[in-house]
Image (cartoon, rainbow, N blue to C red):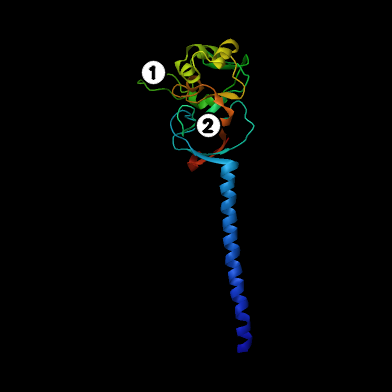
Amino acid sequence: MAENNKRRQPQKEESGWQFWLQTIALTIAIYAVFFLGFKFVLSNDKVSGPSMQPTFENGDKVIATRHSNLSRGDVIVLKAPDEPGSFYIKRIIGLPGDTVVSKNNKIYVNGKLFKEDFLKAGDKVKEPDTSLYAGKPYSYTYNFTLSTLAKNSPEWQSRYGANSSLLSKVKKTNKVPAGTYFVMGDHRTVSKDSRIIGFINKNSIIGEVKWRYWPLNRWAIF
C-alpha cells in the first residue's frame, strides 16, 4: 500500500501545477481582452466641468464606444482642439453638410426644427443672478448661424485664419464642412463648444457615450 501511494503522489503534484498554469493563463487572457477592448473598442472617461449639465455632472464616469456610426443628438467624447491632451464631452448637433441655425432658442437643421428633448431637464434649471445669463435656463441658446460665426467669431478666425478657405465657404453656405461635426453642450449658457472652438474633425472623436456607470444612483444607458 505504501508503494502505491508513492507512485500516485507525482501525479497529484503534476495536476496541481496544471491547475495553476491554467489559472495564470486564464487571468492573462482576461486582462488581455480588457486591455485590447478598451484600446480599440471602448473608452473609459470621466466628465469634468459643467458643460453637459444636468445630463452629466462633474465627476460622472462613462463608457464610450469607438468607431460608432454617429447621428445628430449623440453624446461624444472628443479631443479638445484648443487644449492639447484634454478631452471634452459634447453633443452632436450638425453632421457634415448640414446647415445649422439657432433662432428664438430653437435649433434648425437643414431648415427643419431639431427637436431637442434632451434639453427638457435643463429647461427647468435657472442660472444664478451672478451669471451673464441670470434667470435664463441652462438650455438657453443665443441666436446664431454658421455663417455669422464664420464672419464674426474671433475664436474661429484665430483657429482657422481670418482669410481661410474653410471660413469663406462656411460664410457662403452656412454648412458644416465635410469630415467635421458641429457640437454643443447641454448647458448652453456656459458650454465651450463649436460656437467657440469651431468644427470637430472626425478623427478627433474618441467615441460615442453609451453608459454612465458612476455614480450608481445615476446609472444610465444612452
- Which quadrant is the N terminus positioned in? bottom right
Q: Secondary structure at mark 2?
A: strand
Mark number, residue 78: 2
Depth check, mark 1 against mark 2: the one in front is 2
| Mark 1 residue type | Leu
The residue at the point 53 percent across, 31 percent down is 78
Q: Earlier in the sequence, mark 1 or mark 2?
A: 2
Mark 1, Cα crowd under 10 Å, few <14 / some 14-19 / many 20+, is few
Mark number, residue 132: 1
Q: Above or below — where is 33 with respect to 100?
A: below
- Expressed as whole percent of the image width and height from the top left, the position of residue 137 reads 45, 21
Q: Residue 165, can we see it?
A: yes
Nearer to the camera, 83 or 127: 83
Q: Residue furthest left?
A: 130
The residue at the point 45 percent across, 15 percent down is 154
- Expressed as whole percent of the image width and height from the top left, the position of residue 103 reads 53, 13
Q: Above or below — where is 219 with respect to 128?
A: below
Q: Quadrant of residue 38?
A: top right
Nearer to the camera, 6 or 93: 6
